[in-house]
Amino acid sequence: MGNTKDQIEYLGMSWDPSRIVRPEDLRTQDVRFVLFRLKKALPDFVFHDGYLEGNPISWPEVKTLMDGVSIGGHSVSDVEQILNLKRAWEWPISLVQENRFAPRKRFFRDQRMRRFRGSPGMGCFQNGSGRNRGNDIQAARPGKTSGDF
């Protein structure tokens, strides 16, 4: 069982390179349909982005905020973070709707992503302490290695 073909046969699998789909054979979707599906899934994306940042706002509350209704019981910064995440998603969506989106390096270099309140800047991650569902987390200090902990 020295070569790949023997290993594939041993596992009971088969390999036919002619069955690989070429990019030009892929079915394309209408942009309006893709945008419709993206907008339906947007509350999920915003909620999960906020969750990764340690935001305690629940999915129904995110959906309520995105519908333009205020919620109570959360800090202003948590609410602003969710609204900023929503705006961050709306920007590329608007570019696609206006037929101005071009996924090339030059596009991303020339078009600067908008910076919202609380963001440290393009290409920078938050540092300092954060929250993870109520648990305090202390981020690593810049310049410190894993041996320092």
Image (tube, helix red, strand yellow):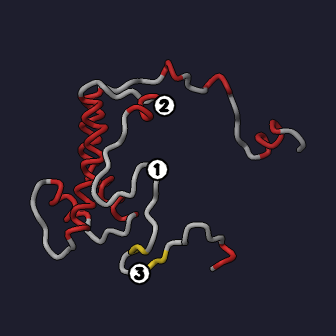
Question: Closer to the N terminus: mark 2 or mark 3?
Answer: 2
Q: Secondary structure at mark 1?
A: loop
What kind of residue is marked 3? Asn
- Is the residue 7 above or below the residue 108 in the image? below
- Quadrant of the snapshot with the C terminus: bottom right
Label 2 – label 3 distance at C-alpha: 38 Å
What kind of residue is marked 2? Lys
Q: Residue furthest front?
A: 143
Q: Nearer the viewer, residue 40 or 99?
A: 99
Closer to the eye: label 1 or 3: 1
Label 2 – label 1 distance at C-alpha: 15 Å
Label 1 – label 3 distance at C-alpha: 26 Å
* Residue 116 percent across, percent down from the top left: 28, 53
Q: Secondary structure at mark 2?
A: helix
Closer to the eye: label 2 or 1: 1
The residue beneath circle 1 is: 123
What kind of residue is marked 1? Gly
Question: How many numbered circles are shown?
Answer: 3
- Quadrant of the snapshot with the N terminus: top right
* Residue 132 percent across, percent down from the top left: 40, 74
Question: Closer to the N terminus: mark 1 or mark 3?
Answer: 1
Q: Nearer the viewer, residue 144 or 82?
A: 144
The residue beneath circle 2 is: 105
Residue 135 image label: 3
* Residue 30 percent across, percent down from the top left: 30, 25
Determine which quarter of the picture holds residue 29: top left
Q: Nearer the viewer, residue 14 or 18?
A: 18
Closer to the eye: label 2 or 3: 2
Q: Is residue 99 left or right of residue 73?
A: right
Q: What residue is shown at x 50% (from left), y 72% (from top)?
A: 139
- Is the residue 8 above or below the residue 29 in the image? below
Q: Secondary structure at mark 3?
A: strand
